[in-house]
Amino acid sequence: MSNNILSVKNLEKTYANGVQALKGVSFDVKKGEFLVIIGLSGSGKSTLLRCLNRLHEPTGGEILFHGKNTAHIKGSEVRNLRSKIAMIFQHFNLVDRHTVMSNVMMGSLHSTGTFQSLLGLFSDKAKEQALKYLKLVGIADKANYRASQLSGGQKQRVAIARALAQHPEVLLADEPVASLDPATCHTVMDYLEKVNKELGITIVCNLHFLSLVRRYATRVIALKGGQVIYDGEPKNIDNAWFEKIYGEGAKEVHIN
């Protein structure tokens, strides 16, 4: 029996303006992996993640989740998929005027119902789960703060807790530390690693910094021009591979 939770086969995405962002991308994701995707801006990294949970509609190819092709599902099937393949973003996407607790409980909307959520009628179980995940990412003491009162790193940890409230099997992270100070990057990445190891949730994460990739990734895929040019272990990305991925003359920036 396959241990793959996701299988991407010849995935293509062409935008309405004619830009072909993905050109026949294929790879598998094993259950429990911490897979990191790297590449220059415009290489197709964000498009790929958005196709995986159907924020974008692929133009061609297949995305198999537990063996079922989800590339062209519609309606409630898409909503259900996004609860199983949750996502956090570079700019957090929190509701600033709401409390941290309220933001996290919004992650359970798929099981709460729109009417109850609009009135703030979350169940005791939803509140209990929200607090559990806030504790997991070390920010339970801020539960009653407004999201607007938090630092960037704290907001990203709330976003992780909100994604966990969906009870996902896969967590997609699109440049989760790109908007943060270097000193805060490891804090957020440490919590993603904790989610991966303690909860067994598969992580697929876009990152810029190879120093972070080497520290956290169990496997790396590099995209260039919408195609996979590397699939392997972080330790095998030497200077020659770095230049092939990022271009001749590119300099590596380290996050200590």
Image (spheres, rainbow, N blue to C red):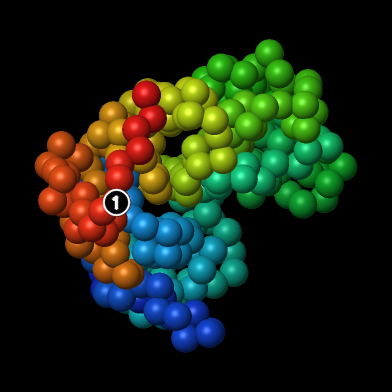
Q: Residue at x 16, y 51 (%)?
A: 241
Q: Is residue 26 left or right of residue 173?
A: left
Instruction: Tell me where residue 100 appears, x and y as whole percent.
Output: 72, 29
Instruction: Tell me where residue 210 appears, x and y as whole percent.
Output: 30, 40
Q: Examine the rendered structure and indicate whether residue 96 appears above or below residue 140.
A: below
Would you say residue 256 is visible in this rendering? Answer: yes
Q: Examine the rendered structure and indicate whether residue 245 appears above or below residue 111.
A: below
Q: Which amino acid does label 1 sit on?
A: Ala
Task: Kindly identify which residue carries mark 1.
Answer: 250
Q: Examine the rendered structure and indicate whether residue 140 appears above or below residue 207.
A: above
Q: Residue at x 77, y 52 (%)?
A: 114
Instruction: Tell me where residue 46 appears, x and y as whole percent.
Output: 45, 59
Instruction: Tell me where residue 86 appears, x and y as whole percent.
Output: 51, 47
Quarter of image, res 47? bottom left
Q: Residue at x 55, y 45 (%)?
A: 90
Quarter of image, res 199? top left
Name of the residue lying farthest toward the top? 141
Q: Examine the rendered structure and indicate whether residue 24 appears above or below residue 209.
A: below
Q: How many labels does the image show?
A: 1
Q: Is residue 169 left or right of residue 128?
A: left
Secondary structure of residue under mark 1: loop
The one of 250 and 163 positioned closer to us in this rendering: 250
Q: Is residue 159 left or right of residue 238?
A: right
Q: Considering the image in quadrants, where does the C terminus appear? A: top left
Query: Dot 1: few (<14), some (14–19), or many (≥20) neighbours within 10 Å?
Result: few
